[in-house]
Amino acid sequence: MRLAFIALALTVSAPLAQAASQPDPAADMKAFQGYFLKQFPKLPLAAYVNGPYNFSKSESDQWKQIMEFPPYQFAVDDGKKLFETKFPDGKTYASCFPNGGIGIAQNYPMFDAKTGKVVTLGIAINRCRVANGQKKLKLTVGPLADISAYMTSTSDGKPINVVIPHNPKALAAYEAGKEYFYTRRGQLNFSCASCHVQAAGMHLRGDVLSPALGLTAAFPLYRSSWGDMGTLVRRFIGCNQKVKSEPSKPDSTAYRDLAYFMTYMDNGLPESGPGARP
């Protein structure tokens, strides 16, 4: 089984692997979503936010039981307390975000024209802390993951709406994220697409490989294998490690751009984080 998977990952080409001479994110998204809808014609677009549970009845049944008492609820509750706790200057996180930070998670990552960089929700939370005289939090786990879980929970069901403005730097960031997604790396010579496009829905050992479509919608999430909450960038780092590639720093441009591309591909799908996975 493992050899067959490796052979497939190394030989099958992914859609969108060849970059167009002129970036066209909207066309890319249409092709990306269309690829999966053609591969799995019985699966509605919105269902992709459920990841591996679309492809395993036993796991789906277990998931439904688990969700009666969501394992991420503690993080949402803790995140709400942290979100509402005042900084020494009397302000809260709400002061840093439109609409007081409620119901806005579906708009991240977003491009910041002032810095010329992509800003994820986690980076925006840390920016808020710095603006209020506080130290940055780890972008992968802990309090920041909890705050993200709470903020994301207030956007539950809202359509993902990542915007790529007609700005050369924004388009370059999108293209860099797209290139990262399809570039093979590490000793195993895998790309993100090797697992989550070409082998989507297949089994690798005891795991079902989630389609890339909808993958970002459930983050941050609680993973049984982690035993706690984790952000999307934590997953990026873990995937790099699994293919024996040196991970980038959590706030790196590479991971920001990758999140930008992947989340844009999920535009229109309902925000479903925080989530739970094996």
Image: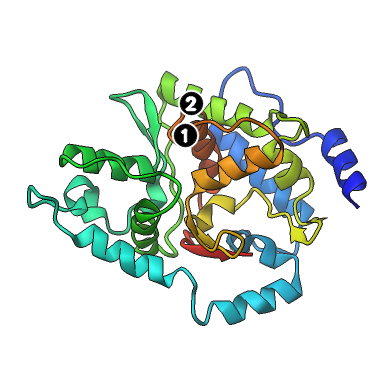
Specify the color scheme. rainbow
Which quarter of the rendered picture does the C terminus lie within?
bottom right
Mark 1 and mark 2 in contact? Answer it, CB < 8 Å.
Answer: yes
Q: In this view, does 16 lie to the left or right of 119?
A: right
- Looking at the image, is mark 1 or mark 2 nearer the viewer? 1
Amino acid tagged 1: Arg
Say how many tags the image has: 2
Q: Is residue 124 left or right of residue 69?
A: left
Residue 269 seen in this snapshot: no
Q: Given the current orientation, which residue lies at the most extreme left position? A: 90
* Residue 142 image offset from top left, x and y in percent: 39, 54
Question: Quadrant of residue 241 in the image?
Answer: top right
* Residue 246 image offset from top left, x and y in percent: 62, 30
Q: Disc 2 marks which residue?
A: 173
Q: Is mark 2 on a helix, strand or loop?
A: helix
* Residue 222 image offset from top left, x and y in percent: 52, 63
Q: Disc 1 marks which residue?
A: 256
Q: Residue at x 71, y 30 (%)?
A: 186
Question: Quadrant of residue 122 in the image?
Answer: top left
Q: Is residue 261 left or right of residue 207?
A: left
* Residue 19 image offset from top left, x and y in percent: 65, 23
Q: What element carries label 1?
A: helix
Q: 68 or 211: nearer the eye?
A: 68
Q: Distance between the residues labelled 1 and 2?
A: 8 Å
Amino acid tagged 2: Ala
Q: Earlier in the sequence, mark 1 or mark 2?
A: 2
Q: In this view, does 8 lie to the left or right of 213?
A: right
Q: Is residue 116 above or below residue 134?
A: above
Q: Residues within 10 Å of mark 1 (few under 14, many from 20)?
A: many
Residue 110 seen in this snapshot: yes
Q: Which residue is drawn at 25% across and 40% down?
A: 135
